[in-house]
Image (cartoon, rainbow, N blue to C red):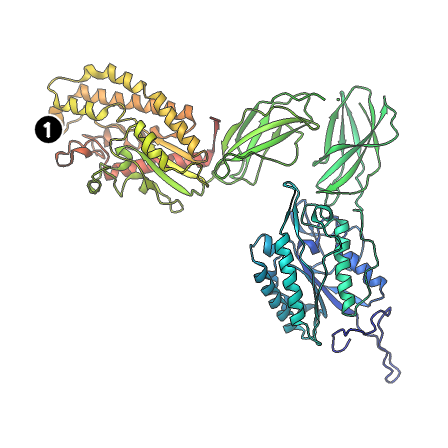
Amino acid sequence: MNGGVWRRGALVGAMVLAMVLATGGAVFAAAPLRIMVVGDSITQGSSGDITWRYHLYQHLLNASVSFDLVGDRTDLYNNVTNQHGDQTYPYPFDRDHHAQWGRPLTFEKDTVQGAVSSTGAQVVLVLLGINDLAWFSHSPAQVADDMRTFVSNARAANPSVTIVIGHTLSRYDIFGKVYLNQADTADLNARYDALAASMSTSASRVVTTADPAGWDPAVHTWDGTHPNSTGEARIAAAFANALNRVGIGRSFVGPTNVTWPSTGPAVSTTSLNRAARLNWSATPGATGYLVEQRVIKPSNETTFTRLPYPVSDTTWTTDGLAGTQVDYRLVPTKGLMTGQPGNHSRAVFGGVVPGRVTLNGSPGPTANESRLSWTSTAEATGYYIEMIDLARAPDSWTRLPWAVSATSFNPGLLNAGNWYRWRVVPVNGLLEGPASVPIEIRTTGVPQYTRFFALGDSYSAGIGNQDSKADAQCGRSPNTWAYLAKAPWDPQPELFACSGATTLDVDLYQKGLIPWHAPGPTLITMTIGGNDAGFGPELTNCILLPVQCTHREPALNDTIDALYNPLRLLYRDLRLRAPGADIFVAGYPQLVAPGLPCPLAINAALDDDERRMIVRLGGRLNSVIQQAAFDAGVVAFTGEVTGRFAGNQHAACGTDPWINDLVFSYRESSFHPFEPGNLAYALALNDRRVLVNTNGAVRSVL
């Protein structure tokens, strides 16, 4: 070492690397070489991991290198609780490091100068880049540029620092059975090699490792990304051999096929009626436990047989014939990695397809949870939970990766205010029964809508506002209630409502404007049914004909009642088109005020009996809308609308009317809400939205 830099050919294999200076009888030993390991989760490791840092540490000790691993951390990441600070290493060693779970090079390049400065690092071993490629979508060229900055910043703290850059490691999708990032990592590693060749100087060496010998992420990781014990040893070997090239230590002479040393926990058994329950304490880092059994009675087996699936909990109950005696032991698993069997315990107690369970559910205790419960079926050893995110992937079932043994489950990590479809599949070992009838649950909380569609007739178009005159075709007002109801975080409403629209018009012309299965949760609002019921022509006849029109009430009742199926089918079709949408359908306010004095035109045109009939017909239509919405699984806010308009008070002829009476200059706006009435509609919608956001919702599947 000269000025803190190791030279090729220097004698570094000595046990202590002592430099003895005899000055006035005093003897001084050279300080240990300060080595800082920089990286992400592959370098930090997680609970129970040996880590490649340990293998490198042992190698340097065996090579008689005097060194000190330095850094600002000593911990592992707890992969079970998702917390830092874990110290469950299987073996003792110098644990100082500068690695952090999830760390990208694009961040580390800006902090390495401080780390080198604070630790006094003379050698930096860095294994970074895969997070930048996989999660930050950075190109190999961009990552290589970040590595160049990393080297420059490290040198700013120590101009004579030696830097070893590890080749990035490709990944493997353990579910899809495909290799990931192979081309990008190969490209990046070639750029790292070129970078090292161009930046290395006699004062500050920069080299790269080779790929770990035979690296195969399908074989050498426990989850497709993070190295298993064999993968850790092979990464250490690659760094050891690179250090040897700059004169530190020797070529790697150590095991490159290593078994995870974690041993299965002790098992306590409880005898149950025709069953046995196993309990144990968690093994650090274990994501599951393989159960091994040896049937003593009646089979008198001498070897253990491993059950084909891991248990994720620390308790397991199994059924069997009364009197059966079975020895059980556990093998901890960490993803694809398995540890060693623990001691066995003896329990005192085979496969048909389990039957269908009945699923019930409700919104959960928080906005990110739901509650599921289901009936048990005697043959099941567990239950798979399957989910469809109706707002994002409405055609794809996703199964939670493990079967639960209980008959209730609170799925979490859900989006607030979103619709999810759930079903439960019972399993007996590896035999799956029929799935339950699914249910749909909307979580509580405020959704982040991506689109807002306002459909319907003139009551949604806002034709009662004077500014609707500008739209001669549909009478759409820029101040209709959909715009007034928009919250600051909502998207701008897309107003497709049109004056005169019927259920058929919405079905043929408006519904198709909503993209099929558009991604993200959407909001759909609508008023429809009044034109189907013929309210416009009937009201005109009541006003213009010289005879009273109350004799028309029975026929109009039949017409209104016949709207149930068209409305229900329309609401159902909207759900099919936008399965993740919140669909709110409004009713109609009371149009006229019986028993109160009206303008001369209305007094002359509509007597009190006719006004009362109009009120009854409106109420009947609202009831049909309400029932059709309930049966179709959409939300009606008819009660909120009539409540906001307060009956006689805000009807035409009311004490404080919000509905136009006869408007001779703009006849189309007659008996429609004007500006205060549109605000009332907006407030009614938001009253219902708040209720749904607070309570969530449950509905059956179409």
Q: Is residue 700 left or right of residue 620?
A: right
- Taking the spot 68% from the left edge, 72% from the top edge, the residue there is 200
Regarding mark 1 in the picture, which secondary structure is present there? Answer: helix
- In the image, is residue 621 above or below residue 243? above
Answer yes or no: is residue 657 visible: yes
Q: Is residue 641 left or right of residue 75?
A: left
Q: Quadrant of the N terminus?
A: bottom right
- Taking the spot 82% from the left edge, 20% from the top edge, the residue there is 323
Q: Classify mark 1: residues with Cα within 10 Å, few (<14), some (14-19) or many (20+).
A: few
User: Looking at numbered disc 1 in the image, what kind of residue is underneath it?
Assistant: Leu
Count the marks: how many?
1
Q: Is residue 567 left or right of residue 698?
A: left
Q: Percent from the top left, x then y, of residue 699?
A: 47, 27
Q: Percent from the top left, x then y, of residue 580?
A: 46, 35
Residue 302 placement: quadrant: top right
Residue 385 placement: quadrant: top right
- In the image, is residue 37 above or below residue 502? below
Q: Percent from the top left, x then y, of residue 409?
A: 60, 32
Camera-side residue of 59 and 556: 59
Identify the residue position indicated by label 1 in the image.
Answer: 600
Q: Percent from the top left, x then y, of residue 318?
A: 74, 26
Camera-side residue of 4 and 175: 175
